[in-house]
Each structure stands twice: as structure tokens, then as C-alpha cells.
């Protein structure tokens, strides 16, 4: 967060951000980074609540924060007439709201998840367990971010219209992916609970149920966005050049977003079985390294926007196949080793 205040400008320049948007991008990034600690607090607190089967109150917290974000966006632009900074400021404030609600809920809970600020301390034995699973996942996220910077640099090379169009279409990819992510988190939670209880048959059942629900829900939502893309894109865009790039991305990437279910659910199941490093390595290799190779080879030969975007479904397929194989190997080893 602190370092980002100083390197936001140079990093965006290295990414090839066009001159007509660089100043706005720097302002937005610096303000957004201020909200990172509150995003962390919400994620940690929400994860604790979800581990007990309570996924409603974290959702309600986000809904309230979303309403606050919307009201602030309208207020800041109408009353104070702020530019891009108002979007970032509203986002930071909404993050403070969601994290405050979750922390307040935890402070009012009963044991064993009650948060008592006076008793906060580090327990080495528990810290080791947390780091064993958390560090690989964290490193995976960092590598993902670095890869995304390189990918964004390639998108930037197509100009401002491509940047705007890609960002608009990405919103709908996120909506569809959230369905996958929800079932992946569910897979981790329920697999770990049943694995600890020795219910190995349930672990297999959880995997199959989560996979099918993830594929169906994400596929259905993606189909709605793709078929109604003219209406949905019209909510964000009017410029024909921007729409050209947005439609390319939504037709290629959003249509096949359900493929992320294959590797996300498999990775979640492995983490629930206590194996976090292997899915992290596979994800980094398949979704990061492969994409970097693609943009440094194929995209340089064929400098077309659709060639860049088709990289996503290709990496999802490759990563998914490897992840499913790894899951079945781990499952066999874990189940046989405990029977």
C-alpha cells in the first residue's frame, strides 16, 4: 500500500499506459491502494464466518457496502463534481464499511470464533499450519498479478479503445467467475471439515456436486451476458471502437468462463485435503507462465486483439486438465493413506 504510492506512476508507464489516461490511472491506483488493509480485514473475517457455514452475513455486509458505494458515487459526482478520484474514494469507503461490519459481527460472536481484541496473540503451532496453506496461495496470487501486468501491457498496446472495451467486458467475466469462486470456497470449507472427520466418501461427493453446480451456474450466467451483450455493454459503452473490443472479449472469454470451474474446484478440493503447494504450482504454470509465453511469441507474430484474448480459454483448458489429474492422484494417496 505504501510502496504503491511511490511506484504507481512508473509501473503504469512501464505497462505502456496511453498518455491520455495515465494521469487518471495513477490517481485511481493510489487511492485504491489505501483501501487494501480493509479488503484484507473483510476477507479474513468473512472466511472465518464462512468456515462455520455462515455465508449470509458476509453477503449482507457486501450488499450494504455496495449501496454505500453507489450512493457515494452519485453524491461525489453530483455535489462535489469529482472525476475518476470519486470512484476510488467511494470504493475505499465501501471497503471500510464492509470490513467494519464483519469485524463487529465477530466481536459479538460466541466461542470459538469470537474476536477479542485484548486476547489477540500469535500461536506458533497454529501459525505454522496457516502459513503452510496460505503462503503457496499467496505466492500464486502475487505471480498472477505480475502476469496480469504483462497481459495488461499487451492490451495497452492496442490503444485507449481496447483498454476501455476490455475493462467493460471484464466486469461480466468477474460476475460469472464469482459463481465459480463461491463454489471453490465452498469446496475448501466442506472438504476440510469432512476430511478432518474421516468422511472420505463425502469429500468425493462434495467435489462432484461443487463441480457440476459451478459449471452450470457460471455457464448459465455467461450465456445471459453473451446473448444479451448489446444491452449489457450499452450500460457502460457507446463508442463504436470501444464496443468492437468489448464484444471480442465477451464473445471469446465470457462464453468459456465456465472452464475455470475445472481447475478452481479441483484446486479447492486439494487445499481442503491439506495440499496447497501443488495446486499453486499448477495454476502458476498453466495460467501465468503459459500466458506469458503466449504474449511473447504468438501475440508478437499476430498482433490482433482476439489472438490475445483466446489465450485465456487455452490456459484454462491446459490448467484444468493438469489440475484434475493432480486431484485424483492426491485423493487416491490421501484416502488410501488414511484407511
Image (spheres, grey):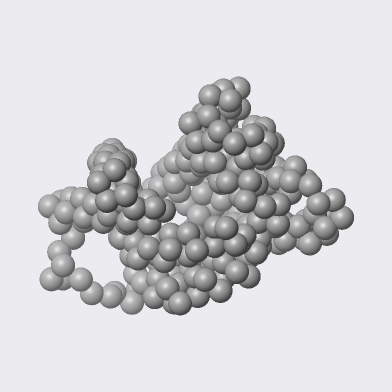
Q: Looking at the image, which is closer to me, 316 or 213? A: 316
Q: Looking at the image, which is closer to me, 223 or 241? A: 241
Judge whether 26 appears above or below 114 on screen: below
| Image position, residue 284 (x, y; %) | 64, 60
Q: Residue furthest right?
A: 301
**Residue shown at 32% from the left, 49% from the top:** 81
Q: Is residue 35 left or right of residue 311?
A: left
Q: Is residue 233 left or right of residue 39?
A: right
Judge whether 104 appears above or below 194 on screen: below
| Image position, residue 269 (x, y; %) | 52, 48
Asked if residue 105 shows in the view, the reply is yes
Residue 120, by quadrant, is bottom left
**Residue shown at 50% from the left, 36% from the top:** 236
**In which quadrant will I find the N terminus?**
bottom left
| Image position, residue 152 (x, y; %) | 63, 57
Q: Looking at the image, which is closer to me, 275 or 73? A: 73
Judge whether 258 appears above or below 181 on screen: above
**Residue shown at 60% from the left, 22% from the top:** 227
Number of marks in the rendered image = 0
**Residue shown at 23% from the left, 74% from the top:** 121
Judge whether 19 appears above or below 177 on screen: below
Asked if residue 47 shows in the view, the reply is no
Residue 156, by quadrant, is bottom right
| Image position, residue 308 (x, y; %) | 74, 49
Amino acid at each position: 500500500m505504501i510502496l504503491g504510492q511511490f511506484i504507481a506512476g512508473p509501473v503504469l508507464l512501464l505497462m505502456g499506459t496511453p498518455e491520455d489516461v495515465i494521469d487518471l490511472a495513477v490517481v485511481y491506483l493510489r487511492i485504491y491502494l489505501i483501501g487494501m488493509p480493509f479488503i484484507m480485514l473483510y476477507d479474513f473475517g468473512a472466511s472465518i464466518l464462512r468456515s462455520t457455514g455462515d455465508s449470509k452475513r458476509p453477503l449482507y455486509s457486501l450488499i450494504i457496502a455496495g449501496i454505500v458505494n453507489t450512493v457515494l458515487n452519485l453524491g461525489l459526482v453530483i455535489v462535489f463534481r469529482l472525476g475518476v478520484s470519486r470512484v476510488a474514494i467511494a470504493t475505499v469507503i465501501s471497503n471500510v464499511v464492509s470490513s467494519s461490519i464483519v469485524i463487529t459481527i465477530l466481536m459479538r460472536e460466541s466461542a470459538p470464533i469470537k474476536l477479542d481484541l485484548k486476547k489477540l496473540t500469535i500461536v506458533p503451532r497454529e501459525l505454522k499450519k496457516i502459513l503452510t496453506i496460505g503462503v503457496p496461495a499467496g505466492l500464486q496470487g502475487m505471480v498472477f498479478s505480475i502476469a496480469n501486468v504483462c497481459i495488461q501491457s499487451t492490451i495497452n498496446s492496442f490503444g485507449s479503445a481496447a483498454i476501455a472495451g476490455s475493462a467493460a467486458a471484464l466486469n461480466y467475466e468477474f460476475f460469472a467467475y464469482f459463481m465459480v469462486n463461491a463454489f471453490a470456497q465452498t469446496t475448501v470449507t466442506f472438504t476440510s471439515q469432512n476430511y478432518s472427520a474421516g468422511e472420505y466418501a463425502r469429500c468425493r461427493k462434495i467435489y462432484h456436486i461443487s463441480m457440476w453446480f459451478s459449471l452450470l451456474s457460471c455457464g448459465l450466467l455467461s450465456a445471459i451476458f453473451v446473448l444479451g451483450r448489446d444491452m449489457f455493454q450499452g450500460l457502460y459503452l457507446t463508442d463504436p471502437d470501444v464496443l468492437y473490443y468489448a464484444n471480442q472479449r465477451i464473445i471469446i472469454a465470457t462464453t468459456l468462463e465456465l472452464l475455470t470451474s475445472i481447475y478452481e474446484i479441483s484446486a479447492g478440493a486439494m487445499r481442503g485435503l491439506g495440499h496447497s503447494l501443488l495446486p499453486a504450482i499448477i495454476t502458476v504454470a498453466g495460467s501465468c507462465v503459459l500466458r506469458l509465453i503466449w504474449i511473447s511469441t504468438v501475440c508478437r507474430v499476430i498482433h490482433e486483439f482476439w489472438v490475445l484474448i483466446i489465450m485465456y480459454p487455452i490456459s484454462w483448458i491446459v490448467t484444468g486438465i493438469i489440475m484434475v489429474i493432480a486431484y485424483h492422484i492426491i485423493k487416491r494417496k490421501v484416502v488410501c493413506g488414511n484407511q
